[in-house]
Image (cartoon, rainbow, N blue to C red):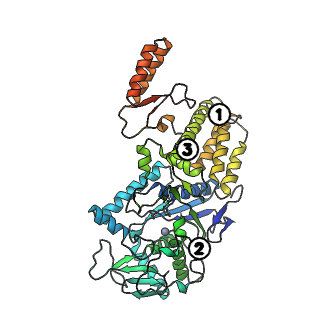
Amino acid sequence: MSGTPLRLYNSLTRSIEEFRPIHPGEARVYSCGPTVYNYQHIGNMRAYIFADTLGRTLRWKGYDLRHVINITDVGHLTSDADAGEDKMEKAAAAQAKSIWEVAAHYTEAFKRDVARLNITPPMLWSVATDHIPEMIDFAQKIEKSCYQLESGLYFDVSTVPNYGSLARAGTDEGESRIDPVEGKRHPQDFAIWRTSAPDEHRQMEWDSPWGRGAPGWHLECSVMSLKHLGHPFDIHTGGIDHREIHHPNEIAQNQAHCACPNPGANIWMHNNFLVDRGGKMSKSAGGFLTLQTLIDAGVHPLAYRLMCLQAHYRSELEFTWDNLSAALTRLKRLVQGIEKLAARFDAEPRGSLDVVEVREVEEAMSDDLNTARALVLLESVVAGKGHAGDRFTAVRKIDRVLGLRLATLHRTELRVRPADAVIDEATIEAQLAERKEARAAKDFARSDAIRDELTAAGVEVMDGDPLGWDWKLAL
Ligand code: AMP
Ligand code: ZN
């Protein structure tokens, strides 16, 4: 493919490696998706912004992207290991709804957030419960690596080479989270199939050679990646918590399935956590922030995307409202600068010069997705001197990889506008126009009166605002 070779950090080898596609010209990527028992919090959404940034970079560089994200609607217990209740069953009971209703509701909410963040939908949203026969088939093929207990079929991790080499021993996400299950041969052994207890009634259960029950959570990703991308495929992504249990277990299953040491994917990539003052943002801890919470506070979702892009995906990112508000201001400046460029584009559309920053953005993104550097380069194009037409074209090109909708985002969309604001934009604009006329006619009493009316309605008039925003709703 064109230009600088793409170099990515592989958690498996713990080093930066050049991306070499298995199928020439193609990039096959699988991303662990949401467990749809609750809304995704903004930390979860960081994982999909990261996967989208990777996908956009691959496409930018000319690869034909085949991207699959799974929807987990069965099997994920309240801990990543084998103890605890089923997340879906528990949520359905608490909400007095069927599991299918719960799954449909949160899947839809998730996809809405994906669209709001301008995340490119994958080639396939792969739903776990659509793959039960394939899961049973896969489990039968790896039965030699498994043993049966009353509670289900378990994978014996000693049957594969170097089990867990992906994980970082000693992190608090690691072994301490493995709960004991009576009869397991090794603490890390995990459920392939969970057989329902005789007195247990689950909403989701299927017949299998190991009794009526449900598949283990780790099984689904091995099965769906094999089915839709083939093994081995190029890149597997997920949040950094998956590096400790879920992905080592997928690798073990893949190795047992091919009866070879191949882990199933060449490169394993993990985004670091979004944290807040209380630590890692997590759904089970409750009290988390959703994208809707940010929108209700009047912040545009793309300001959150930009906030994520300011950090490297492998670094922890702290969420504070101040950081988010700074990202919103940065986005406003970009949009304002680009609006000016776009206005000049019509007058001077045909440039001939290459904008050097476009090549530099490619270098930055090829260097393990250095989005922070790409943003700085983008700003230098916007603020730069050269030909407006060339620069606007360059902005559009760079935005294909950053995904901030910069060519179409309008400044009015970026106004801070809390959900409970009652006053409508047309009224505000009309009053401001009248105030402008009053000021032009030196009728300062009238202009001050209008300003007071607006203030009373919660509108902050920003005369001389360097961003040229004129007004915002006071938070
Ligand atoms: P889940 O719905 O819990 O299975 O998580 C969906 C995705 O979000 C997975 O890739 C997780 O690893 C990732 N994730 C969970 N919590 C966070 C967080 N605080 N920051 C970034 N990614 C996260
Ligand atoms: Zn997964």
- Callout 2: 10 Å neighbours few (<14), some, many (20+)? many
Q: Nearer the viewer, mark 1 or mark 3?
A: 3
As drawn, the label of residue 166 is 2
Going 28% across and 66% down the picture, which residue do you hit? 93
* Quarter of the figure that contains the N terminus: bottom right
Q: Please, what secondary structure does the residue beneath circle 1 have?
A: loop
Q: CA distance from mark 3 to mark 2?
A: 34 Å
Does residue 298 appear anywhere in the picture? yes
> Between disc 1 and disc 3, whose residue precedes?
3
Three-letter amino acid code at the position of disc 1: Pro
Residue behind mark 1: 349
Residues tagged 3 and 2 counted as in contact (Cβ below 8 A): no
Q: Secondary structure at mark 2?
A: loop
Nearer the observer, 464 or 322: 322
Which residue is at the front of the view, 23 or 176? 176
Q: CA distance from mark 1 to mark 2?
A: 51 Å
Give the amino acid at mark 3: Ala
Q: Is residue 8 left or right of residue 36?
A: right
Q: Where residue 67 appears, x then y in whole percent?
A: 53, 62
User: Residue 365 got which mark?
Assistant: none
- Left or right of residue 168, residue 2 in this image: right
| Element at label 3 | helix
Name the residue type under label 2: Leu
Label 1 with label 2: CB-CB less than 8 Å: no
Mark 3, residue position? 327
